[in-house]
Amino acid sequence: MTELDSQLHQKSIKQIQARSVIKLMLAMLVLGFVLGALNRPWGSIPPLGWALSPFDGLWLRPKSVFSSSSKQNKILLNGLQSQVSIQIDSDQIKHVFAENDEDLYFAQGWIHASERLWQMEFLTRAVSGRLAEVMGEKAIPIDKMFLKLGLATAAKETTDLMLQDRLVATALNAYTRGVNAFISDIDLKRLPFEYKLLGQKPEVWSVNNAGLLIKFMAFSLSGSSFDLPLSRTKATLSKSDFDELFPIKLSEPEPVISKSGSWQTLGRAPPAPLIDFKPDLTAMESHPIEKTGAHPENGSNNWAISGKRSTTGMPILSNDIHLNLTLPSLWYEIQLTSPTQNVYGISLPGAPGVILGFNEKLAWAVTNAETDVLDWFQLRFRDENKGEYLFEKDWRPVISREVNIQVKNQKSVPLTLRQTHFGPIVYEEDESPISPKIPKGLAMRWAGLEATNALKTFLLLNRASTVADCQTALENYYNPAQNFLCADNSNSIALWHMGRFPMRWQGQGRTISDGTSKQYEWNGYISRSDVPKGKNPDKGFLSSANQNPTDDSYPFYLGWWYGPPFRAMRINEILSEKRKFSPGDFIKMQMDTLSVPARMLTPVLLQSMESFAELSPVEKAALAELKKWDFHFSENSVAATVFHSWYRETERNIWSKYLPDPVTHFYPRAWTTIQLIIKKPNSKWFDDPTTKNVREVFSDIAKINFRKAIQEIISTFKTHDVRKWTWSEFHPNEFDHIGKIPGLGSGLISTAGVDWTILANQGKHGPVWKQVVALGKKPRAWGVYPGGQSGDPTSPNYDNFIQAWSSGNLKELSFLSSKLEQGPRHMKSITLEKAQ
Amino acid sequence: MFFKNQSQNFLFEGFLLFSVMLSLSYFTSAADGPWWILVVPAFFYGAFREDPKISTRTGFLIVALAATGAWLLPAFYQDAWVGFRISLRISNVAHLPLRIFSYVITGFIGSLVATLGWIIGKNVREIVKPYLTEAPLRVNRRGD
């Protein structure tokens, strides 16, 4: 090679090197940028590089010792006293056999944590106002609401009270140790999906968390209040109109307990004040905010028949409880056995014991009592500092406390909590409540904030043998008030409308109360012996469906907002048939879709339409469907779609003439509306005040509303083919994720029923546990809940029960007598043993 | 290399690289190491594997496919075990139209970091090679 060649070669190498250096630097820059971008969270999106790594992130699932593929059959745990055996079914139901109660609850805590840890932590965070710590700023309004409601403080007081009780303290402490035994051993690479998505790690479980969960249930079931919308309605209508549409005593059929005057009590409600308080509503303008918080229709059905009405000769009990439909389900199915108890049913992850279910001798069921135990008080402040408020003739101080809401990736947000002797001032006048039903600037008195030992009731029910034991267990039960139904294998059935009910004058607390007057305070509580109850009635059955608990003769005031009577009417109609019932009859009855309002109103509607000549082909076809309808809201029913739309349109049309907005004002109860239509079709309420020379009657507006309803259905289905207007397509169910994380719920589920039928499916609300128990020498039971035992959204056991639930296929529950017995779905056994 | 057919050799090479990436990722993860460990074998492949028969495009493809496979295979295995529910949930949460996109994005991230590592390795080789491989020049001053 010549020197020139050499020089050229060197130059060429240098050029290549220079280009390579540039490419190298560029590549390193890009790699640095890519790694930086993939290693940090973007808002609610976790670091993508880690999240999608199949060795670390979302692809890596929790390992479960409960799965059939796991070879691990013995688990050593610190905290156990002796061995615990767990039989596991193919659908992941755990049958737990322990040699003492402490180990039993320890094992239950460990199992709950294994399957539902994120759910447990999420709910307790929500109630204690700590969601924004893990979910960011979007959770701040929810945290604010719960902190202002004062649930965290109430939960602590409740836990402190429960820990004074030996039975409850043993259970709670053992349960807590069990949960923490799981957490201490957890593989952080295999956390549940939600933890990874949110970049969260499990916290140590506190014994106080059980109190938080009890307050969560209290809020869900008794945290609704309609004082503000009803106050607006009262201010809008004349006194006579208001009294006509909103009577204090609901004269509705089929109350839970009807005594027709023979109440064995000398007590009476105190007298009402002579002057009716008119609250100042000017500061509480309406908000077009979506409703949140406790679902006003959280309720249920329960019924039981005595042995003389059953094919088995022993009582049969049925319960289906209605709450928000979520995945995972709020409930966890389990059997718990120790020397003191053998109980099966649904448990609440986060708390020990079985909440609803049965044991060898007794079954119990609940429906929400819907009693009004939440009142709002308008305060008169001394000055604009609002540091003192007038009560009678005294100026009382408002106690203020500052807290901070911790927010993920941001500075904490300060919050002032203000307290009066009634309770907290939940929202100040310059704040925006998360729900339009929560008034601003008012103090709240709510029975749900009182310390209670509700857990003791359920722990005693787990061990109870007779209806008398049931009554003893209920002595500890205050809130949320429930209609407790018990049946035992001594052939007794009994029902109690049980809770702690404030002693108030008739109608007190329906609207906003005067916070300056002691006449509006609660005068103690109704005596426990005076609560409505019934036992072994001649008719041979007892039932409840959230309706009015008593008839007009009951001497005390319990409230005014109850579920409509339609489900109760249908239940009692069936149970009043002159025949005996089998468990299969009750399973079928839980799926009953006959609508009493539809049966009452459809003939009226059809009659109204007879004179309506100018019907379009689609309207004629819709009417033809109604004419042949059997009033069942079945999946394929077209008439159900037509009727439902027509009724909703009619209800809105009638009341919107007088009351501007169903969210900000309270519309009359459905029973009131329906009675007006049937009994007073010429009532003034059907008249349109804007048409001066015309006095409309019901049949006039029925036609108009029918036409509007048809138009609404067409715009929903985008077709004039009425055959496609099936009820299940119009009104499907849907399950949200329990933490409202998009993508982790279900899709739309086709179902039958509506909130007024026994099968009470209503969008994102419906039966979350169904059970039928036939008592006898050994009980037989059937049950299902919509969801699955696993809280892991990627598990086959996350939502595997939904199909059976939607079809009403309750499985026979394997109630084992000993750890040596194996049920028909037995899959494997594991033991928990004391670590040396 | 081992096969007469060049394509077979490339495939085998890719398989070896895939195996290294898979094993290294698995053991690194067990030791709480970084998720992007794929960069390392890709870097070394770029730095030390020189074969005139392997064009830049072929080399890029070998690395990209090896890395994609190293991530997709364990993802698929875990997903198949639960009836492909993991990919479904990832696609739901990420608002992807089909669950296959969960795999697409996963594979893309793995191959992206690996190919960047390979590019870096390749360019390091280009810079350093002249100092390591070049024989001293013999200069004929008479121009022969």
Image (cartoon, coloured by chain):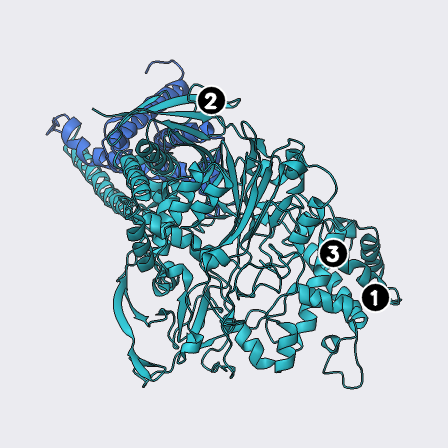
Chain colored cyan: A
- Percent position (x, y) of residue A538? 66, 46
Q: Contact (CB < 8 A) between labels 3 and 1?
A: no
- Percent position (x, y) of residue A354? 43, 39
For mark 1, give the secondary structure: helix
Under mark 3, the amino acid is Ala
Q: Residue at x 70, y 58 (%)?
A: A644
Chain colored blue: B
Question: For the residues tagged 2 and 3, is the chain the same?
Answer: yes
Under mark 1, the amino acid is Ser
Q: Is residue A368 above or below residue A702?
A: above
Q: Contact (CB < 8 A) between labels 1 and 2?
A: no
How many discs appear?
3
Cα distance, mark 2 to mark 3?
47 Å
A522 or A760: nearer the eye?
A: A522
A392 or A657: nearer the eye?
A: A392
- Percent position (x, y) of residue A23? 26, 43
Answer with left or right where residue A665 lies relative to residue A538: left
Earlier residue among tags 3 and 1: 3
Q: Which residue is mark 2?
A: A827
For mark 3, give the secondary structure: helix
> Disc 2 is attached to a residue of which chain?
A
Q: Which residue is mark 1?
A: A608
> Disc 1 is attached to a residue of which chain?
A
Question: For the residues tagged 1 and 2, is the chain the same?
Answer: yes
- Look at the image and tell me whether residue A99 can be seen: yes
Earlier residue among tags 2 and 3: 3
Q: Which residue is mark 3?
A: A598
B88 or A8: nearer the eye?
A: B88
A257 or A290: nearer the eye?
A: A257
